[in-house]
Image: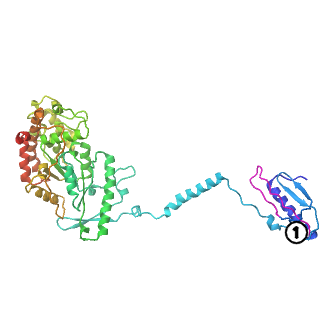
Amino acid sequence: MTFSKDPRSSCSLAKFWCWIAHLVGPTHPHTHLGPLVPIHRQRKKRHCKGCLSSRPQEDQGATWISVGTDLLVVMLPIPKMSTHDPVISTKAACNRRTPPKFSSRKLTAFYFFILTVVFICGRHLLPRPPSVKNNNKPSTTEITTTNTNSDSTTIIIPPLKNLIDKNGKVISDISWMLDFAIIGFPKSGTSFLKNYLNQTEETFVYHREFCIKKSSDLTRFVEVYHEVHVRFQQQQQVQHNNNKNKRIRFGLKCPGVLYRSHDMNIYKTYFPNTKFIVGIRHPVMWFESFYNYQVGRNVSLPASTSSLIGKCENHQKVCTDRARLHAALARLRKTPLVEKEEVDLLFGTRYEGNYSNNTSSLHPPQQQRRILSSSKHKKQQDGFPNQLLLYEVRQLHQNDTTPRKLSETLRNYLDIQSDLPPILSYKNIKPRAINICDDEHANVRRLLVDHGTDAAIWIKDYLMENPTVEIASPESFVRLLDSWSADPCATAS
């Protein structure tokens, strides 16, 4: 007897033997059908157990005939009389098949597929936090601005995607994000002023220096300050108190902006309404403080300060040219810059021949005229529209009424409603790498005093004439400015 090796044919064969048993059963009631041995899985993935029947335990003497192939073995008993009724499987039992078994590889693939579907489709059904909910809808966040005339205006904070594109490029007006900027010279009280203004609830200054030197810095500024604007507005809505209508003034601190052309172009382009706060200092004391600060940061500087006369070289930040604070302030184009007397004050033509070391950095008159008449300067002829507040760093530490007047000037300048806390005088003592009053630095001090003399004259006669320039406590400011024409070391001794 031959049988097909196809599992489907084997399953059909098992059903055939069940049909035979069904026919024999009624005729020979004592006939017992032995169990059909399950088909062995060889080279095939599907199998059928066939028709199962049970054989009575007392039927030990029955003779069995084995018929089948390598896929199917059927045990047929020879009929034998017994008092035990046979148990014959029905045709429905023959139609049952075992469920398919998955291999470990298939199960892994199946689970991975389920997880992928849940991650892609199901994450949209999960609840989102309030910070990202309705991010694609137009923002209705509003800020109420209170002016000095008790008039209120409303500023709507747009969503971040309306301010910068996917490449980080600014595509909308962001001038409303920055109310003031502390861009004074290094070591001129910028950190003190940042911490002082953060003591009031109506101002916010970023806790670290936030300089916008390139396009990526501008993108980061928009991202950070947009979040800050939204957070402060949400806090005001939650509080529901009398301070709800008080607008927060947002600012940053970045000393040295006036030294860098790219920084200034960014402010002129994107922040024309930002109010500048600039602190100045006697050039001699500024040079000493900045030199010691750089050495404290492990910056390598020459021990002889005479080698630092002139322009900064080899990426050094300390040199006498940087102490020409009035030349840096002139880049704001708030003075005419056409009179010869003014140009001579800015470029030091009065004393440039007295210092032979690196004097090429001090431009001769012919080069001054060429610089001021160049197309680059003509494009900036209109100057910066930003308002400017000037203070002398010693105004922060005096024991008279000057600190109180400076506080009141800041309050009015920034349109702050509540009173600012009092400015407490202090004296910051730090280790010094050099003492500028030592005799070895006498040559540098003479040049720095010349810079200070020209700076004081230019600020009083030209810069202070501009109506957009405000002076903190003008009387004390002018008095301190007059002292720039004297060597502070000689005065102290």
Q: Position of residue 277 (x, y in %)?
A: 18, 52
- Nearest to the observer: residue 47 or residue 322: 47
Quadrant of the rendered image containing residue 405: bottom left
Q: Residue at x 31, y 68 (%)?
A: 237
Q: Position of residue 413 (x, y in %)?
A: 16, 58
Q: Is residue 343 left or right of residue 22?
A: left
Query: Which secondary structure class fits the magenta region best?
Result: loop
Q: Residue at x 88, y 64 (%)?
A: 33
Q: How is the image coloured?
A: rainbow
Q: Position of residue 214 (x, y in %)?
A: 30, 45
Viewer can see residue 309:
no
Indicate whether 413 appears above or below 429. Answer: below
The amino acid type, in three-letter code, at marker 1 is: Pro
Instruction: Label 1, secondary structure: give it.
Output: loop
- Nearest to the observer: residue 62 or residue 171: 62
Viewer can see residue 335:
yes
Asked whether 34 falls inside the magenta stretch, the response is yes
